Image (cartoon, coloured by chain):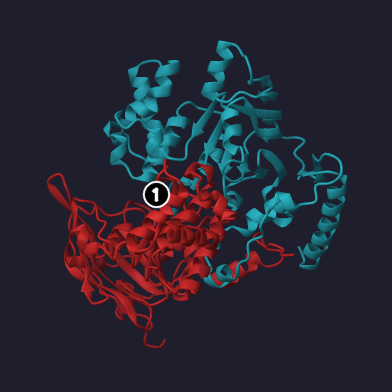
Amino acid sequence: MSNTNKEVLLSVKHVDIAFNNEGKKFRAVKDANFDIYKGETFALVGESGSGKTTIGRAILRINECDKGEIVFKGKRISGKISKEEDTNVIRSIQMIFQDPAASLNERATIEYCISEGLYNFHLYKDEADRITKVDQALTSVGLLPEHKSRYPHEFSGGQRQRVGIARAMIMEPELIVADEPISALDVSIRAQVLNLMNKFKEEKGLTYLFIAHDLSVVRFIADRIAVIHHGRIVEIAESEELFRYPLHPYTISLLSAVPMPDPQIEKKKELVVYDELKRDLSGPKPVLQEIRPGHFIFANDREMAEYEAKLQVMEKEHEALGE
Amino acid sequence: MEERKAILSAKDIEVKFRVRDSYLTAIRNVSLDLYDGETFAIVGESGSGKSVFTKTFTGMLESNGSITNGSIEFEGKDLTKLVTDKDWEGIRGAKISTIFQDPMTSLNPIRTIGSQITEVITKHQKISGEEAKKQAIDLMERVGIKGAADRFDEYPFQYSGGMRQRIVIAIALSCHPKILICDEPTTALDVTIQVQILKLIKELQQELHFTAVYITHDLGVVANVADRVGVMYGGQIVEFGTVEEIFYDPRHPYTWALLSSLPQLGTKGQDLYYITGTPPSLYNKIKGDAFAPRNEHALKIDFEQEPPFFKVTDTHYAKTWLLDPRAPKVEKPEVIQNLHEKILKMTSKGGAFYVEHE
C-alpha cells in the first residue's frame, strides 16, 4: 500500500494556473498537489472545464504556473529554465492527443510525422540510423515498416492513434501525458490502444499521466487516480482503493454515471447529482488530507469527521462481505 | 410479443456514394421496421453505415450519395421517391427530426437561442410571432432550462454544452415529430450530463409519444435507452433483437467482440479483448460474411457465401452461419458469459461500481 519506497518522477507542488479574461482572473487550477511515481499510470479524471488538460499542459510547459512549481526528476521545470533543460524536458515528456486525425500533419508522410522529433533534436547518427529507429517505432506499435511512405488519411482511426504513440515513443520519453487518448476511437480500437500503452509500461517502465473524463476506462488502466472538479483535486487514491471506498460526493457522482453494458441494471440506474451549491460548506477552509494510507480527500475538520464515520461503515461492510 | 404497428418500414435499402471514379456501397440491402413508440438503437463502429442508413429517412444523404435500391414506407409514401426540398416539406424536421452529436455545430452561433427555436415553429405552423415565442419558452422550460424567459435572448456561447443539447432537443421536438433520430446525442457531453440528457429524452418520449432511433457506438447508452437493438457492420445489420436478447444472448461473433472489448469488463493486469484487422473496404464487392476475415470463429462457408438471417426467437435474428444446424457449436467468449450476474456483482455492495444512494 505504501508508496514510501517508490521513486517520485514528477511532482506538481501547490500549483495554481490562472487565465486572464478581459482583466478578470479565472483560476483554472487551484492548488494542485500530487506526485507521480516512476513506472505508474496516474489518472486525472474530471469533466470538461475541470482543469485536467490545463495541468497536463503545464507539465509540458505550454501553460505557465501562477503559483507553485512542477518538479521533474528533482529539477524544477516550471517557470524560467535554461534552454538546455527546456530541450531535455521536451524530449523526456511526450504527449498523446485525443484526436489522432487532427494531431498528424495530413500533408506529411508517416515517416516524416514520426521522425519530426528526431530531426528537431538531431537524435540520429545518420540516415540509416533514423530509418531503423522509425521502423522499430512502427513495429513496436503493431504497424509495418512499409507503412511509412503513406499519408495519415490512408489509415483507420486506431492506426492513426498508433502512429501518434509511435511518434511519442521514438523520443524515448520517461513520461507520457496522454490526454483522452481513446475518447475519439471506436470501442474495438480502444482496447488495442489501452493494451499497447500497458505493453510499453511493462517493457520500458514508462510512466503515464492519463487524462480522462470517465471512470470506467481508468479503473482498467490506472494505478492511482485523482478526481478533479472545477480546478480542485477532491480525492486521490490507488485505483482499487478509490473504487472500494469512494468518499467525496463528486467521485460518487462520477461513479454513478459510468455506463454499464447491462440493460436491466442500466435502465434502473439513478444518477447521483453533485451540486456544490447545495453542500454544507461551513467551517474552516478545506485542505487535501490523508484519510487512509495513500487516500487523500479535500475536506475540513467537520467534513473529515463525516467521511471518517462513513468510512468506518464501509470498512465494516467490506469485512462482512468477507474481503 | 403482440402485433405492433410499424410506423416506418425500410426494405432492402442500398446506398451508393460516388467517390472520384468509383462507387462505394455504404449500405447493403438493409431492412428495418420501426414500431410506434419504441426506442430502437443502431450500434456499430464508425464507417459501419449507421448514420448513412438513418439519413435516408430524412433525405439528407450527401450530394454524391443516392439510394440505388429499396423502399422506405412512411405514412403511405415511399420516402426514396422524394427528391426536392419541396417533396420533403412536412416530413423532414416536422414528422421526422434529427438531433446531432455536436450541439455547437447544429446551432447558429450568431443568432439568439430564442430566434432559432421560433424560426422552426413559425416555419411549420401558421401562428403569430407572439404565439411562437410563448411556445418556444414553454419548450425551453420543458427541456429543463431554468429561467427560460430570461435566457430567450441569449446566444449559444452563453449556454453550457448540456444546455445547448437541450435546446437542440427543444428545436427537434417543436413540431411534434413522429420519429426522433438521435445521432450520437451525448458523445460530446460529459458523463454526468449524458445521463441527464438520456433521461430527458425518455421523459419527453413518454409525454409526447414519439419513436426514437438512437445511433451510437456506446453500448452503455444502448443498454440505458433501447427497447430493441440492431448491430451494424460493413453496411449491414448483422443482428437485431430486444435489448435483453442482444446483451444476454448475443449470437453474432461481431456482437460478441463488441461486448467483450468493453473496459468495464476488463481485468487489470490482463490484456483487453480486441478485434484484430480492419473493417472491410466498401469499394469492393464483399464476398461471404463481411466480418469473416476478423472472426476467429469463421467457417469456410463464411468466405464464400453471404449468410442469411437465422431466426433465434420471434424478435431475435442474426446473420451468421454459426446458427446453421450444420455448423459446429461455438460458445460466446468467457468474458461475456453470465454478463448480468457479473455486472450485478460489480454494481452491488462490495463491487467496484457500487454507488450508495441516499
Q: Given the image, on which type of amino acid does mark 1 rest?
A: Ser
State left or right for residue B152 relative to residue B2: right
Question: Badge 1 is on which residue?
Answer: B106
Q: Is residue A95 visible?
A: yes
Q: Residue at x 53, y 43 (%)?
A: B158
Image coordinates of residue A7 in percent, x first then y, are: 70, 31
Q: Colour of chain A?
A: cyan
Task: Please tell me whether mark 1 sits on a helix, a strand or a loop.
Answer: helix
Please rate how many residues cluster around mark 1, counting C-alpha atoms within 10 Å: few if below 14, some from 14 to 19, many from 20. few
Quadrant, the N terminus of chain B = bottom left
> What color was chain B assigned in the picture?
red
| Image location of residue B71, percent across then percent down | 20, 71
Q: Nearer the viewer, residue B48 or A137?
A: B48
- Left or right placement of residue A102 versus residue B11 in this view: right
Identify the image quadrant of residue B52: bottom left
Q: Nearer the viewer, residue B312 or A268?
A: A268
Q: Can the viewer see residue A190 in this picture? A: no
